[in-house]
Amino acid sequence: MLTHGEVSWYLEPTVRIARKLSTIQRSFLLAISGAYRITSTQVILGIPPLHLQLQREVRVIENYRLRLHLSINIIDIDPSEIDKKATGGQHTHRNI
């Protein structure tokens, strides 16, 4: 429901929008998983940040449905790779 029409409203996300989306996603992930509030967002269920997922989906839609030209580096975003590069490893527990 949140991603409906994302191409029209999520073209140039701001830090403020990304922070709000992260807050929304975190509250739902905590409710679904039953994890403690002090648990890192990256650890909960191993789901990529919502703002990165939305950004990727918008780029794919722009490329395939709207036929807009994009560089290959933009649509090949893999959130788990970004997490590994940013933190030096993946933070998903092996039992999850």
Image (cartoon, rainbow, N blue to C red):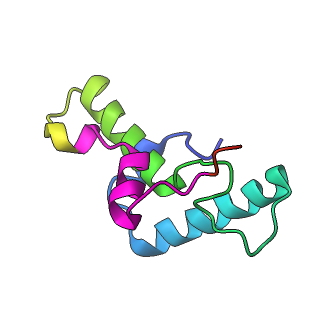
Residue in the picture at 64% in, 51% down: 93
Task: Work out whether 55 lies above or below 70.
Answer: below
- Percent position of residue 24, x then y: 67, 62
Left/right placement of residue 96 relative to residue 37 reads left
Q: Tell me if I can see residue 70 in this picture.
A: no
Residue 41 quadrant: bottom right
**Quadrant into which the C terminus falls:** top right
Q: Nearer the viewer, residue 3 or 34?
A: 34
Does residue 59 appear left or right of residue 46 in this picture? left
Q: Percent x, y for residue 52? A: 43, 52
Q: Residue at x 59, y 47 (%)?
A: 47
Give the vertical position of 23 relative to 71 (above or below): below
Q: Position of residue 57 (x, y in %)?
A: 41, 38
The answer to if 76 sits in the magenta stretch is: yes
Tell me the quadrant of the picture where the N terminus can be found.
Answer: top right
Closest to the observer: 45 or 21? 45
Magenta residues span 74-92
Examine the structure image and report whether residue 88 is included in the region drawn in magenta: yes
Horizontal side of residue 35 vs 88, given as left or right: right
Q: Is residue 50 left or right of residue 7?
A: right
Q: From what the image shows, is residue 43 above or below residue 75? A: below
Q: Is any atom of residue 40 visible in this view?
A: yes
Q: Position of residue 72 (x, y in %)?
A: 16, 36
- Camera-nearest residue between 56 and 9: 56
- How many circles with numbers are drawn on the protein? 0
Of all residues, the one furthest to the front in this rendering is 94
Residue depicted at x 53% and y 53%: 50
Rendered residue at 18%/43% (across/down): 73
